[in-house]
Image (cartoon, grey):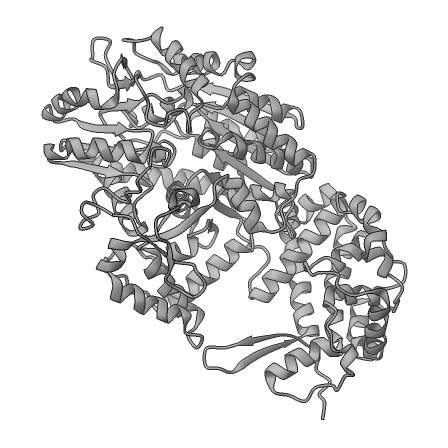
Amino acid sequence: MLSNTAYAKVKKLADGSYETEDVEGHTEKLLENLILLERYYGSAIERVVGKHIWEDLKVCALFHDLGKYSPQFQNKLRQILKLVFSKLDAELRKEVPHNFLSVAFLPEGIDPPSPIFYAIANHHSRPLDFNEAYLKKVLALLKPQLEQMKWIEKHGYQPGFWDGYYPYLGHDGRTKFDKVRKEPCYITLKGLLHRLDYSSSAGVDVEVERIENPTGLMVGALKRKAREGGWCFSGLKPFQAEAEKYRNSNVILAASTGIGKTEFAVNWIGNDKGFYTLPVRVSVDAMHDRMCDMFGREKVGLLHGGSLFRMFNTGDEEDDIVTDQEIQDFLHKATLARQLSMPLTITTADQLFTAAFKWKGYEQIYSTLMYSKIVLDEPQAYSPEILATIVTALQEITSLGGKFCIMSATLHPFITEELRKCADVVQLGPVYNTELKHKLRLAGADICSLFPDIEREYEKGKRILVICNTVKKSQEVYGLLQHLGNVHLLHSGFIVRDRALKERKIKEDHKKRDRIIWITTQIVEASLDIDYDILFTELPTIDALIQRMGRIFRRTGRALRQDDPANIIVACKDPSDDGYIYATELVGFTREALSKVDGSIIPEEMKAELMAEVFNQDRVKATDLYKKFLRYRDLLVNGFEAETKKEAQELFRHISNITVIPASVYESNMDLIDRSIEKLERRANSFVEKALAARVVRDFTVDVPIYRTKRKGLSRLDKKGRFQLINVPYGEMGVDFRKGSQLEDLSNFM
């Protein structure tokens, strides 16, 4: 006998059994999450679209899955469960996606082009591969199920029935939909429906309760840090305390590196929902740990491509032992972060700003950011194409009610100009560190010609940072200096395990008094909180150089006297990136500006003056950097869209990376890697087992630009091609990891 249960979802468990959920039960979860959403952020959302949003969203939640009552959908799930299913004629076995069927049951008066109609019809991205006649036949089969839908009446609505809406789905209705889909009400409804649906399916709350008294918690954390460090905390700095005044404003803060911009941002967010973005994962990870110390791990989310793997890594022991309960806690927190549910989320920019490409489902990002605060920290680290994407997204988000705070010591003036076109912006600062920390010396030679100077400073016992523009040059410099002894190398070409070890070591080494040399690339500019004695660097653009300076004499209390020797030495001849990473024109402007202050101490005010000179509006607008920015911005403004989030992320990063394992690394760890891949591909294994196995394999991988892998003998290690073997050396003679990946041409690989 055929059961009356209308299944919404079937989930296979690790033991081979199935967990089911019916349509009514799933819908009730959405309604419970709707109550949470209104409780925590109701007033903020209402300011954008009005109080009617809650009743409209309730209708979306109630009716979004009614199409699952169709015999075709139920047969699909019943066959999985090995239950009796409906016998259908052969010509009616093709399934019409349930989102297109659900709108047939909307109450009278909610007709297209209503945003409610389109939010439900489009809450899944499925092809419209059926005609009107077939739709009507399927709806005729579905109409008798109205009796089973009577549970909706207890929520104040009576299901209707209308089978004449196909023209609003097809080509003829496209004009109407194109207008509706740009309206704030539609973006909000569809986006929040996604959030309610996905979080309910994942078994988590759509929103976690706000952080109470965040400023007090931050001050408490700063006091603890001061006690542990043996210094006196005298309260927030004036500019940090004043952030509270600007909580309802978009803010651009110009401030010196290491002066306390993070505390300003935290105070600006207050107890609103916040997203704190940083350019690279290591800085995101560090900021996440810092915020957890302030507010507790239950209030702070971590969101980037490798965040789930990091959740599994407790980090204290070489062989981490993770309990089942810890794994479940990690998974729960990772799910909350992916569902944008945390009151504060630390994330890479690609997780948010790819929404500017309008991929299917982007509304869940915009509908969340419209009642949130967004912090963009260190934007100078992004390419012009990425900056154009970020600026476009911020312009659209602010039009929906969201707020942003941009913080940098080196913000490009044209970015400020672009943002002022779309939003009221309060420009604060500059806030300068008055300590004199950096003295400049220009060298008319390449970085390799400075080896005698580097060796001399090493013999004096200095902690030395050498920054090259490319991986290839950093490896060359390392090869020539390693004989000195305590010399180390860090760049993006190391496998995950080795890079993590090196990042941890460079942060530990700067606290010691031992002489040491770290050779690295620009990955340290905005990612690592380190404090070394002297910098030798290739010539980049002025914004990058100022960030590099920020790794020298960073700690409060370290300052220069006028007669002290230079601690910033710039090799001006033949920078290794050859204009690929840093625009040739801007490097030339930088060299010209620096020549006027060669031999001088560079106070923070002078750095701002150098930025203004190099990035002079009239001059910059003739450069390739600005032209690339405009091309990408115009592309987005004129309606370019990506089909999927993955495609958007590849466009956002500008160069598609590929995850590879160097051949020598695989050969040295073959048994462990093969066993882990076998666990990953065994269907009977649980998600947790597979995630732990994937983490093991990932430790041996490195991401490289796909165009650098040509003619390198790529081969797949797993069936899905997630892990590929690349025939390149790793380390020296393929034995150790001191040099990292060695592609033949790494000249443009950072």
Residue closest to the eye, 711 or 709: 711
376 left or right, relative to 317: right
580 left or right, relative to 194: left
Q: Residue furthest front?
A: 711
Whether 346 is drawn above or below 247: the answer is below
Quadrant hosting residue 284: top left
Residue 490, percent across and down?
A: 27, 39
Quadrant hosting residue 632: top right
- Figure label count: 0
Residue 332 visible in the displayed image: yes
Identified at 47% across, 19% down, the residue is 430
215 left or right, relative to 44: left
Residue closest to the eye, 200 or 434: 200
Quadrant hosting residue 263: top left
Q: Residue furthest bottom?
A: 1
Residue 182, percent across and down?
A: 75, 43
Residue closest to the eye, 294 or 380: 380
Residue closest to the eye, 213 or 48: 48
Q: In the picture, which quadrant includes the C terminus?
A: top left
Residue 83, percent across and down?
A: 64, 88
Residue 576, percent across and down?
A: 32, 26
Q: In the picture, which quadrant includes the N terminus?
A: bottom right
Residue 271 visible in the displayed image: no
175 left or right, relative to 729: right
